[in-house]
Amino acid sequence: MTLADRFLAYSAQAAAEGSPGWAELAAGLAADEAALAVVERAPESRRQPVLVLATCRWLGAPPGPWPRLRSWLLDHADAVVAELGRRSVQTNDLRRSGPVSLALACLDEPVALLEVGASAGLCLLPDLVSYRAGDVRWGDPLSPVQLTLDVTDGRGDDAPGGAGAGLGAVELPEVVWRAGLDLDPVDVRDDAAVAWLRALLPPGAPERADLLERAVALARTAPPRVARGDAVDDLEALAATAPADARLVVVSTGTLVYLPGRRRQQFVDTIRGLGATWVSYERIGLLDDVGPVDPGLVERTSAFAVLALDGRPLAVGDAHGTRLTTVG
């Protein structure tokens, strides 16, 4: 995929997610050789469309149509390239706690939770969030963070419908320890670091900005530990600090796509070597160690990711974990 293709793909994604502003800017950049040449000066790992657009916003680029951003970008090319070299995508989408919570509900003993690619650790708090799918509620009912999921039964057209179809009572296990691992961790107590998380949110999504503020406020009441390290090389050392009398659960949500194929397999092998339970919410087809799901179900639901427990598919859903269909 060329750089232009990546920006075109992101344009379509942004439009589908209700961010026409970033959709227009990404499409404009995709068709502009001079603008693409600026982005190509940055390290290859720093050319993600969302990172480029967020960096421009962070540096004071004017809002508005593509011609205005193009002019600003060409005038500030050196600053943009330098800042891209210092930044990384740290969206930390709390909505993915929804599918993670449903996988955790399959466990009944106390757990030690370890998330890779944890960013600010906002998704290390699944037991402190309140969830609802139709009439089914779980989590902490008094939480300031409320998530609504659409969960349907994927067993067939004759299965009951509705936002909570396929769910019985959902009970979360006790989380007795939690820690995260990230190459560039974000401290939720650092206002500047949190401001960068805000900059990564697409404009025109006030509900996501509100969710981020609530999640940060919740995390600041008991800041989760997020260690700096590699998802493969440093996983075992961090896992060794978990209490031995709790079930170690390693969580990955949208993280493993950033690892080369061989490193993904090393990650899975490391989890197995630890004897840990693995909860994943990753792109469909990304991992050989996640069992196959019915292609018809994927097509019918336009699913992007698969929720799995130790490689066994539980549900398929959208990229953010707000819309799930259980695997029969």
Image (tube, helix red, strand yellow):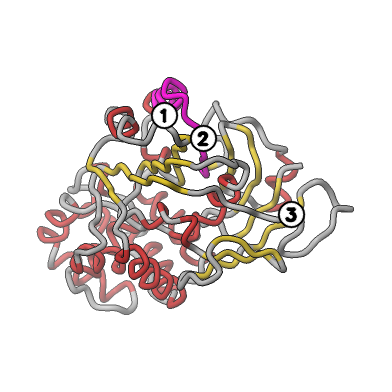
Residue sticking out furthest to the right: 158
Q: Mark 2 and mark 3: span between their CA atoms?
A: 29 Å
Q: Is residue 10 left or right of residue 41?
A: right
* Residue type at numbered disc 3: Gly
According to the picture, the residue beneath numbered tag 2 turns out to be 286
Q: Is residue 90 left or right of residue 9?
A: left
Quarter-of-image position of residue 29: bottom left
- Look at 65% across and 42% down and name the residue there: 314
Q: Mark 2 and mark 1: span between their CA atoms?
A: 9 Å
Question: Is residue 1 among the parts visible in the rendering?
Answer: no
N-terminal of the pair, mark 1 or mark 3, is 3
Question: Is residue 137 among the parts visible in the rendering?
Answer: yes
SS under mark 3: loop
- In front of the other: 181 or 258: 181
- Look at 89% across and 53% down and name the residue there: 158
Q: Which mark is residue 62?
A: none
Quarter that holds the C terminus: top right
* Residue type at numbered disc 1: Arg
Q: Report crowding for label 1: few under 14, some 14 to 19, many 20 or more residues within 10 A (C-alpha).
A: many
According to the picture, the residue beneath numbered tag 1 turns out to be 264
* Span highlighted in magenta in the image: 265-282
Quarter that holds the N terminus: top left
304 falls in the magenta region: no
N-terminal of the pair, mark 2 or mark 3, is 3
Q: Report crowding for label 2: few under 14, some 14 to 19, many 20 or more residues within 10 A (C-alpha).
A: some
Quarter-of-image position of residue 322: bottom right
Whether residues under marks 2 and 1 lie with C-beta atoms below 8 angstroms apart, the answer is yes
Residue 83: x %, y % from top left: 15, 57
Q: Which mark is residue 168?
A: 3
